[in-house]
Image (tube, grey):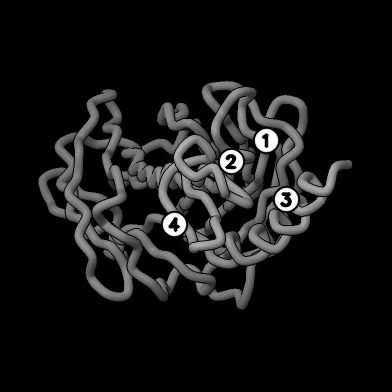
Amino acid sequence: MTDRSFRLLLTGVACGITAWAHYTWIVTQDAAPLAVGRAANLQIGHGHRFPASEEAMDAGQLDLFVLTPSGARVKLAPAASKPAVTASYTPREPGVHRVAMVQDRGIRSRTPQGVKPGGRDRNPNATQASRTLRTAVAYASTAGSAAGAPQPAGLEVELTGELAQGVWRLRLWQQGKPRAGVSVEVFLAGTAKAANAGQTGPDGGLTYRLPPAVKGPALFSASWREPAPAGAPFDFVNYETSLTASW
């Protein structure tokens, strides 16, 4: 291992510890299920006390939209409202609505003069350069809707899940393909911290059995780091994705 690789490894470990100290999620703030024709209040939370948000993300960086049961895409307007980001959505049809968020923070470099936008092509003196992408999905249903198994929302990385007889069957996707070997955490409402739900298998899937009498919402979260594509002007990519569901 070269000195530069070793330095990047040490720096990467330190950054990984701090970068993933918080979770990101989407929840509906209304206790009742969605109702056709009635506005629902959505919240994008950030912090480590799910489902109570501790910090409002930069609303200007977020792409927020809903995929309706019939497949239409409805773009939403997120707005910062301490301590979270909020948005309103009025469903026009019954069924399971997939609320999705993407925060692509782009490429940034650590330099002796501080963190700067762009990769090594723009910052030749960078000690480290990386891209960071965060996504989140929430399942929100109208009353009486059959849960089924929602399809992927088409994000670069995302978790999908289906609940049956107290067992969540999850699958992690990356660019439309199953992503194996990634640890997934679960954060149940009312608990003090997240717990390990397991690691995705060759098909990107894992199963998680809920503790007895547990009610939603629940947050499933995965974060990992991988080397940048060959020839890219940065060293690695930070991925974080979450799935929130109630039942």
Residue 222, given in percent of the width and then of the height, sits at 61, 48
SS at badge 1: strand
In this rendering, position of residue 41 left or right of residue 102 = left
Which three-letter amino acid code belongs to the residue tagged 3? Leu
Q: Residue 25 — which label?
A: 4
Q: How crowded is mark 4: few (under 14 residues within 10 Å), some or many (20 or more)?
A: many
Residue 137 shows in the view: no
Q: Which of marks 4 and 1 is nearer the N terminus?
A: 4
Say what secondary structure mark 4 lies in.
Answer: strand
Q: Which of marks 3 and 4 is in front?
A: 3
Quarter of the rendering containing residue 212: bottom right
Query: At 43% from the left edge and 65% from the top edge, which residue is drawn?
Result: 46
Give the alpha-carbon distance from disc 1 to disc 2, as whole Å. 6 Å
Between marks 4 and 1 in the image, the one whose residue lies nearer the viewer: 1
Q: Which of 131 and 62 is in front in this view?
A: 131
The mark found on residue 237 in the picture is 2
Task: Say which amino acid is labelled 2.
Answer: Val
Give the label, 2 or 3, closer to the camera: 3
- How far apart marks 4 and 2 lie (CA) works out to 20 Å
